[in-house]
Image (cartoon, grey):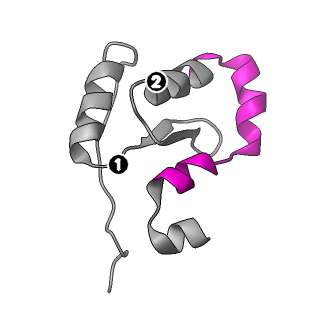
Amino acid sequence: IRALEKGDLKEIGKHLHNAFEAIMAEWHPEIVALKRKALQEGALGGLMTGSGSAVFAIASDEESAQKIASKLSSFCPSVIVTTSYPRGLDL
C-alpha cells in the first residue's frame, strides 16, 4: 500500500502476485516465459491477469515500455503499450 501511495513502480513491481499463476503456468509455460522475457528487457514487474487471458508488465516510462514491447513483439503475437492516469480519474 505504501508503494502505491508513493507511486514507487519498482516496489510495486516486486510485490505483484496472482496465486492462480503458478497453477496456470504448469499448463501454459509460455506465461512464465513471457514474464521472464519482459523482466529481462527491463520491466519492473509482470503478472498474469486474472485467470490467464493476458500477461502485463510495468515499465518506468513510456520510452521503456516501447522498448520492452518491441522486444516482446517477436516473442508474442499481440503486444499493446498503454498507460494509466497518475492519480486515477476524478469524475
Where residue 16 sits: x, y (%)? 62, 49
* Neighbourhood count class around disc 1 (C-alpha, 10 Å): few under 14, some 14–19, many 20 upward: few
Query: Magenta span: helix, strand or loop, mainly?
Result: helix
Residue at the spot x=32%, y=85% of the render? 90
Residue 72 location, quadrant:
top left
Q: Mark 1 points at which residue?
A: 60
Instruction: Please check the rendered image and state whether residue 3 is part of the magenta-colored stretch, yes or no.
Output: no
SS at badge 1:
loop
Q: What stretch is highlighted in magenta?
A: 10-30
Q: Name the residue under label 2.
A: 40
Observer-nearest of 29 and 10: 10
Where residue 70 sits: x, y (%)? 26, 24
Where residue 75 sits: x, y (%)? 39, 14
Q: How far apart are marks 1 and 2 (CA)?
A: 14 Å
Residue at the spot x=70%, y=35% of the render? 21
Residue at the spot x=59%, y=38% of the render? 48
Where residue 80 sits: x, y (%)? 30, 37
